[in-house]
Amino acid sequence: MTFRGKRLGLTMWGTEPVAAMARHAALAEKIGFDSVWAIDSQLLCRDITVSLTAILAATTTLRAATGVTQPVTRHASVTAGMMATLAEMSGNRAIMGIGTGFSSLRTIGRKAARIAEVEAFSHEVRSLLRNEHGRMSWLEAPVDVPIVVAATGPRMTRAAARFGDGVILHHGLSDDLLARAFDWLGDSKVEVSCWAPFSLGATKQEARDRIRSRVAGALVNVNAEWFEGTERVAVERLQSGYDVGHHAASAADHAAVVPDSLVDRYALAGTAEQVRDGLRRLLDHPRIDRVILNPQIVGPGAKPLDTVLRELETEVLPFL
């Protein structure tokens, strides 16, 4: 299903049992989502391969993606084998999202991958999936698995346009931040997905407070010099005190330094009417092909994912 001619994706955190993830994926499919993007972070989330297998087995049209994997702890041959197998079992509904890695690497004391490593890894996986040299002996025919690159800064955004089939923009949602992101992307024709922290509340403040940690998770990877005044000070404080072990949690201490102004620039957060208006604005953007909603489902004050989906089904999606 499309909304205003565009697609909706859903982030799925493997902080709930795999059976629950599969059940929620089936509900997401029913109410019109085109894809789910499962977080690949081994110490914070359940195993990505098992999770994606369960999600694809429970659905018929929904696409399932790594949201996102990285080239440091994953070998290209293993990743290609996983993606080819998922594509085979699901009728080509698998997507490989990839990035430089954050929580999956920082929690084990490793640095983020270099952009060149991400690009080389992507080329190797694509070559294996195409079976260009017959190295995957069991593969009967080439497999088309889209490779979608997560990008926060200018260098990765430009690189994603060069080697990715699509890009996930982690750039914020306000008009000025989107304009900057598309300036970095240039005139590339790659498919564009926009990663959107999402929270619906009885009041705007309630919604902001619930999603503040997800905004903190986005801001920890930005350049503080992109901001000014109190926002720049807040980003610097956040980055110096960020606790990656609480990356998935809603009540992390580091999130308290994120001001409402940055929540409003980075998230769809508010009452049902405010969320509808914000989502319409993104869906109507001429260069955005998909909006990936990223709700907060872990920790005090968070809503269970089935509640989030039911609220979307009744209070938001019918109006789009």
Image: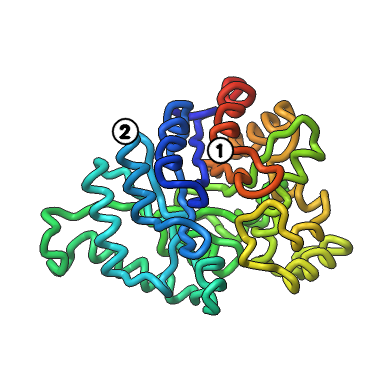
- What is the crowding at mark 1: few (fewer than 14 residues within 10 Å), some, or many (at least 20)? many
The kind of residue tagged 2 is: Thr
**Depth order, front residue of 35/240:** 240
95 vs 54, nearest the viewer: 54
Give coordinates of residue 174: x percent, y percent: 72, 47
Q: Name which residue lies at 34% across and 36% down.
A: 58
Q: Position of residue 147 (x, y in %)?
A: 38, 57
Specify the amino acid type for callout 1: Leu
Query: Which residue is tagged 1?
Result: 305
Q: Specify the label residue 188 is tagged with.
A: none
Q: Residue at x 38, y 37 (%)?
A: 62
Q: Is residue 249 positioned above or below 313 on the image?
A: below
Labels 1 & 2 near each other (Cβ < 8 A) = no
Mark 1 lies on a secondary structure that is helix
Q: Is residue 286 above or below residue 320?
A: below
Depth order, front residue of 17/111:
17
Q: Is residue 19 visible?
A: yes
Q: Secondary structure at mark 2?
A: loop
Kindly identify which residue carries mark 2: 60
Q: Quick check: can you spot residue 177?
A: no
Q: Give the x, y percent position of residue 125.
A: 30, 65
